[in-house]
Each structure stands twice: as C-alpha cells, then as structure tokens.
Image (cartoon, rainbow, N blue to C red):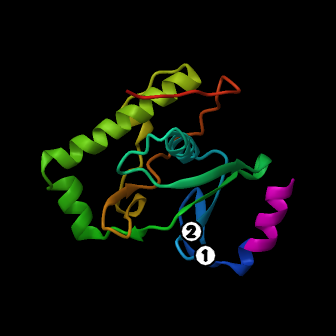
C-alpha cells in the first residue's frame, strides 16, 4: 500500500513533535503536521468529521484544519493537518475550568454536532461523554491566533461508517 510505504520511509526523516497512546505527530513543513495513528483510535472519526465539514464550507471554530485522512490498512491511518501549539495549564484552566459559560457552550455545541454526525454514519446514538471522552490539556491546542482547537477529543474505538458515501450538512 502506497501510504504505508511512504510513511515508513518518511517518518524517520521528520521532526517528532509528540505522541500519546494512539498516535505520533511529526512536522511535515512549516505549518503542517503528519499524524500517524492506530486504527482503533476514535479521533479518526473526529478528523474525518472536521475534514468533511471543511470540504462542505462548514468549518467551525474549535475544529482542526484537516487536509486529509487516509487509512493505512491494519497499521491505522494518517492525517495531514495544520500544526498547533500546546495550550498550557493556565490557558486551559481559564478556558475550560474557570472560563465564562460561553466558551464551554461553544465547545458543547461542537461536540453535539459531532455526536449527530456519529449517529448518522454509524446508526448508533452518542452523547458528549461518549464522543469527547479524552478532553485534557494535551488534546486541546491553540492556533497561530491563540484560538482554541480541539485536536484529539476521543479515546473511544473508531466507528466504521455504514454507508460508502456520506453527505452531511448541519443547519
């Protein structure tokens, strides 16, 4: 498979930025990263949702800008997306723990839209606790303007799509 071969050849030449239980992130070029992930990672659903929304002109504040998500067979998947900076303890706490309610409401709305997407593509019901079960300081970052971006909200298993073609639009 071409994607697997390319990743295996290229990854060692890239700057490693960080990783967690399910993925490793490498700098591709200025402003872009390669995320190499295990297939079991539910964040793949999140990144597919974000890419789909962007493609339909429905980007929402708080979403990462995703160029593409490509499955790599049994090895997982890769994603190319914008590079973001760590949010830090103080900014995370002020936005999510002690910030005003409008910040929490904005991200609750985004989580709700993601749950709606998951229901549509899988046929199963989800609530925010199911879909965004891995929100913490390392999975919330900031863009170059200092705006919050949810990069990796899910530690659930990847949910396979029931339909080959998806058309998803939120009002």
Q: Answer with left or right where residue 3 lies relative to residue 62.
A: right
- Which residue lies at the image location 38% right of the left edge and 65% below the top edge? 143
**Quadrant of the image occupied by residue 52:** top right
Instruction: Assess disc 2: are there few (<14), some (14-19) or many (≥20) residues with their C-alpha within 10 Å of its C-alpha.
Output: some
Q: Is residue 147 magenta?
A: no
How far is the residue under mark 1 from the one under mark 2? 5 Å
Q: Is residue 8 magenta?
A: yes
User: Where 118 sits versus 51, above or below?
Assistant: above
- Which span is picked out in magenta? 1-10
**Quadrant of the image occupied by residue 60:** top left
Instruction: From the image, tell me which residue sits under label 1.
Output: 29
Q: Position of residue 36 (x, y in %)?
A: 65, 60
The secondary structure that most of the magenta stretch takes on is helix
Instruction: Assess disc 1: are there few (<14), some (14-19) or many (≥20) residues with their C-alpha within 10 Å of its C-alpha.
Output: few
**Quadrant of the image occupied by residue 130:** top left
Local secondary structure at mark 1: strand
Local secondary structure at mark 2: strand
Q: Answer with left or right where residue 143 lies relative to residue 68.
A: left
User: Where 145 sits versus 44, above or below?
Assistant: below
- Which residue lies at the image location 14% right of the left edge and 56% below the top edge? 98
Q: Answer with left or right where residue 70 lies relative to residue 29.
A: right
Q: Position of residue 51 (x, y in %)?
A: 55, 45
Instruction: From the image, tell me which residue sits under label 2.
Output: 32
Looking at the figure, which quarter contains the C terminus? top left
Observer-nearest of 102 and 12 = 102
- Which residue lies at the image location 66% right of the left edge and 23% below the top edge? 162
Label ID, residue 125: none
Observer-nearest of 109 and 53 = 53
- Which residue lies at the image location 26% right of the left edge and 43% below the top edge? 106
Q: Are marks 1 and 2 in contact (CB under 8 Å)?
A: yes
């Amino acid at each position: 498979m071409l994607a697997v071969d390319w990743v295996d050849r290229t990854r060692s030449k890239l700057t490693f930025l960080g990783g967690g239980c399910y993925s490793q992130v490498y700098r591709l070029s200025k402003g872009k990263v390669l995320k190499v992930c295990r297939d079991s990672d539910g964040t793949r659903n999140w990144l597919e949702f974000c890419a789909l929304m962007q493609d339909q002109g429905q980007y929402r504040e708080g979403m990462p800008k995703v160029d593409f998500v490509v499955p790599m067979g049994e090895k997982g998947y890769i994603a190319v997306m914008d590079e973001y900076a760590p949010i830090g303890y103080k900014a995370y706490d002020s936005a999510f723990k002690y910030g005003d309610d409008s910040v929490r409401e904005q991200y609750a709305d985004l989580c709700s839209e993601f749950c709606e997407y998951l229901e549509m593509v899988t046929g199963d019901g989800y609530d925010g606790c199911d879909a965004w079960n891995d929100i913490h300081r390392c999975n919330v970052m900031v863009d170059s303007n200092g705006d919050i971006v949810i990069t990796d909200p899910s530690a659930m298993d990847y949910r396979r799509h029931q339909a080959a073609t998806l058309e998803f639009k939120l009002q």
